[in-house]
Amino acid sequence: KAKSAGRDSYAFYSQELTAQAQQRVEMVSALRVALERDQLRVHYQPIRRLADGRLIGFEALVRWEHPERGLVSPGEFLPVAEDSGLIGGIDVWVLERACRQIQQWLEQGHELDFVAVNLSCRLFRRTELEGQVARVLAATGLPPGYLELEITESAVMEDPDTAEALLSRLRQLGVRLAIDDFGTGYSSLQRLKRLPVHKLKIDQSFVRGLPADQNDIAIARAVTALGHSLGLAVLAEGIETADQATFLRDLGCEYGQGYLFSRPVPAEEVERLWSPV
Ligand code: C2E
Ligand code: MG
Ligand code: MG
Ligand code: MG
């Protein structure tokens, strides 16, 4: 009896795996179609200086406007895109879109310091990345200093030598570099000290518990101090309350982004904020 139950549950388990694999295959082909039919969108989340609330830039975040499912978040389709190799095309598309967009906003006279674009760790390992970035900058006419590239701490630490070399080459292009999701990726401080980056982004998981949680306080304070002692700017992600913003500002964290200020929104909505109605 036990044996047959075991076999049944095995059969059930493998059926479930097959269903999952099937879903992935379907998602990959749907994503290909999405790229062809222009179903991807870029939303922009404002980044503010905590001292005075000044808008300094935006982070570009990809979404998939699925004809039946509506807006699909990157957490759902980027892992599949990474596995299937489609991610490179997506990231370069987002990069080009975002550079064009900020260039347009600058030409309209808006004072912005940068647009931040995320790079997947897979793209990041490709050696031709700096050539692609250079081509997008040339094609859009955006001065390199207005582009900030975000690489997660765990992507860097997965292959630190390659990452360091690539970051150095990117830096030579004149772009800005930020370490994303900092605090989740087990950085070696020795390594961090050598990375040619400009900014650390404190992961939102450490912001959530502020200003009450003692562990989050300790981590936010330590990361801010670490960043500053390495000469880096520090930004906190996922700020949802005014108390969190005040607390981080008082710690000396310079920049912030989060639902308190705004959710990521389409470019038209950013423009509606600016243009007098
Ligand atoms: P990330 O780069 O760390 O981006 C921050 C994420 O936190 C975004 O989720 C943003 O919508 C969300 N967020 C912002 N403020 C708040 C807040 O106050 N509270 C909470 N709970 N969340 C907040 P999103 O847009 O779903 O993106 C998730 C991740 O997907 C990003 O994390 C990034 O790693 C990746 N991603 C997004 N767009 C791209 C892209 O174009 N290329 C690549 N390679 N990765 C991307
Ligand atoms: Mg990011
Ligand atoms: Mg992050
Ligand atoms: Mg993240």
Image (cartoon, grey):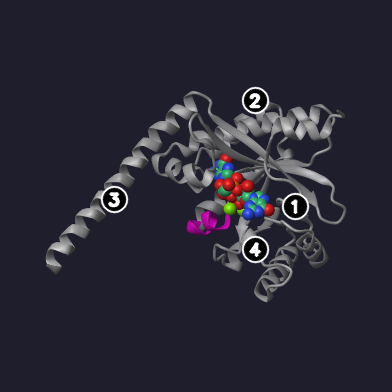
* Separation (CA) of disc 4 from disc 2: 33 Å
Left or right: 155 in relation to 175: left
Question: Residue 212: x percent and y percent?
Answer: 72, 72
| Type of amino acid under label 1 | Leu
Element carrying mark 1: loop
Q: Which residue occupies 75% across, 58% down?
A: 241
Q: Quadrant of the C terminus?
A: top right
Residue named by callout 1: 260
Residue at screen point 78% across, 59% down:
245
Report if the CB atoms under discs 1 and 2 are less than 8 Å apart. Answer: no
Give the alpha-carbon distance from disc 4 to disc 1, as whole Å. 32 Å
Queried on whether the Cβ of the residue with tag 1 lies below 8 angstroms from ligand 1, the answer reads yes
In the image, 275 versus 222, the foreground residue is 275
- Residue matched to label 4: 193
Q: Residue furthest bottom?
A: 214
The answer to whether mark 1 and mark 3 are in CB contact below 8 A is: no
Q: CA distance from mark 1 to mark 2?
A: 35 Å
- Residue depth check, mark 4 versus mark 2: number of the one nearer the observer: 2
Question: Is residue 96 on the magenta stretch?
Answer: no
Which is more N-terminal, label 2 or label 1? Answer: 2
What's the magenta region?
A: 152-159
Look at the image and say whether residue 156 sits in the magenta stretch. Answer: yes
Nearest to N terminus: mark 2 or mark 3 = 3
Relative vertical location of residue 234 with respect to residue 96 in this rendering, above or below: below
Q: Are marks 4 and 1 in contact (CB under 8 Å)?
A: no
Q: Quadrant of residue 5?
A: bottom left
The residue that mark 2 highlights is: 139
